[in-house]
Image (tube, rainbow, N blue to C red):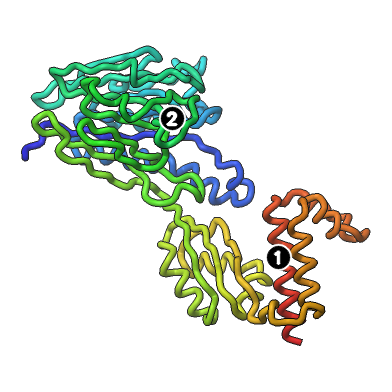
């Protein structure tokens, strides 16, 4: 079927994200993630050029709150100059207007919708397309933006909005609406933003969340990018997702049971794509339990072998010795019970126990800077290592 026109739909660029937690614990990864946001959008511009798209729509959260610095805006503006077609932007809840923005203007091909219902037309080949939408007036709004928009039934209409469908969340701070609101409004394609998980909400009329363009933490796994939308005979004929992420976040799980280091690393490598940012959860029982807990360099060993960035290593492993097989009054069982009671306490109480001597009290600040989970994990590590040592003697 001949294609009348094409357009690119992306959202939630979050340019300028600082990744505060990551940057403090792993500055190199923080820098890579900061640049990855720009790299992904650069690929989207390349995609629009290679596909000969007739226009591009961006459904909000172009920037990342206070991180819209002049440098970030200038880099975006320079990237938008490469587009030789219209780019229409509806601002989201992260896009704050700055007093200095006029000094770094977007190029002439860019149209930013106003906070009131807005519309424009674009000539796409032999077809005139209507594009409607509106921008967030502030960080929060409980107004139903969908209800304020209506298209032209004589044109193919694209509605560009940053909003929250109640099927994803009942949070009413971000232009809440319901799937039923999308019907009977003479809109053919709802280009939505705000939800970071890629979702085709419905078809005819199409309502699509493309997700964000680059995963920002371990909860945003999988491919990220943009949609190429093809239209034929006034209907969407193809909806094609194109991944553009620079770094792919993955969650992986591997077991140490019955494995030596070589076979364990081989399993890990098969589950963590090269170049990805991985969260690894290790399970099972075996001698490798002590190896993983004792050697602080194991994270780098795993990362180097798999050819990826290991963002977190969670150990849910046990030593080869079975603690439950020992008598209740044995030293192994008593140590285990003591460790479990300690790990269930609040962080400050755990640290107070650890720092009960003059020497340990001098380094208390080290433990205070650790998260609750890190402190509890340290207790569990000690429990397993002591149990393994005592059980083997």
Q: Position of residue 339 (x, y in %)?
A: 77, 66
Query: With respect to residue 178, does 168 lie above or below?
Result: below
Residue with the mark numbered 1: 380
Write down the quadrant of residue 382 in the picture: bottom right
Residue furthest to the right: 358
Query: Comparing marks 2 and 1, which lies closer to the viewer?
Result: 1
Element carrying mark 2: loop
- Classed neighbour count for the residue bearing mark 2: other residues with Cα under 10 Å, few (<14), some (14–19), many (≥20): many
Q: Position of residue 246 (x, y in %)?
A: 40, 49
Q: Is residue 92 left or right of residue 158?
A: right
Spatial CA distance of label 2 from label 1 is 41 Å
- Classed neighbour count for the residue bearing mark 1: other residues with Cα under 10 Å, few (<14), some (14–19), many (≥20): many
Quadrant housing the N terminus: top left
Q: Position of residue 296 (x, y in %)?
A: 66, 67
Write down the quadrant of residue 21 in the picture: top right
Residue occupying the point 77% across, 51% down: 346
From where the camera sits, is residue 385 visible?
yes
């Amino acid at each position: 079927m001949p294609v009348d026109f094409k357009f690119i739909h992306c959202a939630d660029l979050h340019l300028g994200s600082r990744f505060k937690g990551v940057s403090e614990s792993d500055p190199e990864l923080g820098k890579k993630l900061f640049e990855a946001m720009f790299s992904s959008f650069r690929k989207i511009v390349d995609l629009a050029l290679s596909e000969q798209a007739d226009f591009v729509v961006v459904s909000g959260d172009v920037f990342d709150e206070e991180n819209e610095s002049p440098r970030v805006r200038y880099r975006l503006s320079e990237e938008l100059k490469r587009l030789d077609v219209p780019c229409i932007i509806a601002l989201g809840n992260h896009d704050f207007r700055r007093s200095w923005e006029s000094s770094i203007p977007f190029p002439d091909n860019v149209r930013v919708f106003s906070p009131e219902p807005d519309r424009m037309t674009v000539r796409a080949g032999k077809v005139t397309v209507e594009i409607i939408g509106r921008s967030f007036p502030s960080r929060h709004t409980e107004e139903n933006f969908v209800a304020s928009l209506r298209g032209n039934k004589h044109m193919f209409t694209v509605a560009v909005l940053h909003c929250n469908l109640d099927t994803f969340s009942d949070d009413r701070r971000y232009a809440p609406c319901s799937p039923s609101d999308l019907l009977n409004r003479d809109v053919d394609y709802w280009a939505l933003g705000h939800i970071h998980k890629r979702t085709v909400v419905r078809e005819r009329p199409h309502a699509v969340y493309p997700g964000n363009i680059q995963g920002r933490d371990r909860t945003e796994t999988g491919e990220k990018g943009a949609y190429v939308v093809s239209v034929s005979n006034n209907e969407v004929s193809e909806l094609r997702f194109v991944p553009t992420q620079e770094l792919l976040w993955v969650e992986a799980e591997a077991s140490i049971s019955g494995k030596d280091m070589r076979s364990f690393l081989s399993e890990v490598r098969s589950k963590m794509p090269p170049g990805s940012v991985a969260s690894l959860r290790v399970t099972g029982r075996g001698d490798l339990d002590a190896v993983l807990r004792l050697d602080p360099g194991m994270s780098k060993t795993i990362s180097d072998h798999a050819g990826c960035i290991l963002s977190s290593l969670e150990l849910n492993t046990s030593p080869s010795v079975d603690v439950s097989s020992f008598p209740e009054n044995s030293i192994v069982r008593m140590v285990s019970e003591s460790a479990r009671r300690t790990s269930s306490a609040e962080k400050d109480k755990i640290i107070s126990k650890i720092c009960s001597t003059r020497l340990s009290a001098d380094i208390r600040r080290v433990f205070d800077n650790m998260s609750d989970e890190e402190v509890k994990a340290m207790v569990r590590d000690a429990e397993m290592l002591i149990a393994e040592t005592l059980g083997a003697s």
